[in-house]
Amino acid sequence: MTENTRNRLTTIAVALPALVSTKAFAAGASEPGLPQLDIATWPSQLFWLVVLFGAGYLVMAKIVTPRIGAVLEERRQTVDGDLEKARAASADAAKIRANYENDLETARIDAAEFAKQAAMEAAKKAEAADAKIAQKLSNKVAKAEAKLAEAKTSAMANLNDVAAEAAVAAVSSLAGIKASSAQARKTASSIATKLAKRGTN
């Protein structure tokens, strides 16, 4: 029902009682007053009351109420649909959050494992580097000890030769005895060996 139709029905409903009372007064009412209170006009008033009430009831029952019901039903369906969408979105959000937490926990475990592996590899590399350095140092120490032993042996040999020559010169100048350098070296070597044994003991 359009707004124009509603306005026309309202105008008719308001104008009909006045029109009926005017006709009734013009037809035979000789005394002025309220025609509604005149018993002679009651049947027509009741008739039009029933007619207008019936028309209003039909309009409300067939046009207005179904439209209101349709609007309410549409709103109910819309609200139910929105609630269902909200529930689905909440479930999806919960699922996404659970997946995110699982992925985060997996990433933490992987990161811890990676850090552990990296630490183990770093420790292995450090141990290997320490072993190489220790081996190099051991080789250098061994070479240095060998060179030192060689230098000591050479020094001792030279010292024996020097001692033998000094002994030969001393014996020759003091006692006037000439001794051979081979004998002097032999004697110096024997004395050096005895001294070395005493030093080790």
Image: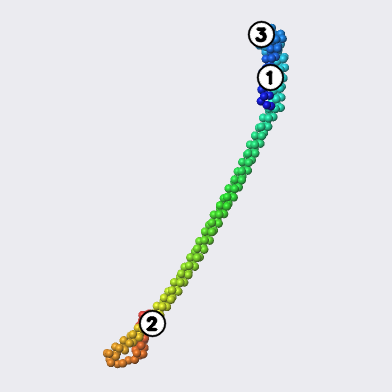
- Helix, strand, or loop for circle 2? helix
Residue 170 in sight: yes
Q: Looking at the picture, does residue 37 appear above or below residue 104?
A: above
Considering only order in the chain, which callout, 1 or 3, is on the residue closer to the N terminus? 1
Q: Which mark is residue 154?
A: 2
Q: Looking at this rendering, what residue extends furthest in the top direction? A: 30
Q: Which residue is drawn at 70% across and 14% down?
A: 20
Q: Residue type at mark 1: give it.
A: Ile
Q: Looking at the picture, does residue 69 appear above or below residue 179?
A: above
Res 147 → quadrant: bottom left
In the picture, the quarter occupied by the C terminus is bottom left
**Which residue is the site of mark 3?**
32
Q: Residue at x 67, y 24 (%)?
A: 4
**Which residue is the site of mark 1?**
12
C-alpha span from label 2 to label 3 = 165 Å
Considering only order in the chain, which callout, 2 or 1, is on the residue closer to the N terminus? 1
Res 24 → quadrant: top right
- Helix, strand, or loop for circle 3? loop
Q: Residue type at mark 2: give it.
A: Ser
Q: Which of 4 and 95 is in front in this view?
A: 4
Q: Are marks 3 and 1 in contact (CB under 8 Å)?
A: no
Q: Where is residue 197 in the image (x, y as percent from the top left)?
A: 37, 82
Q: Where is residue 134 in the image (x, y as percent from the top left)?
A: 45, 70
C-alpha span from label 1 to label 2 = 146 Å
Q: Position of residue 184 (x, y in %)?
A: 34, 89
Q: Residue type at mark 3: give it.
A: Pro
Q: Which residue is drawn at 57% across and 52% down?
A: 103
Packing grade of label 3 (10 A; few <14, some 14-19, many >=20) is: few
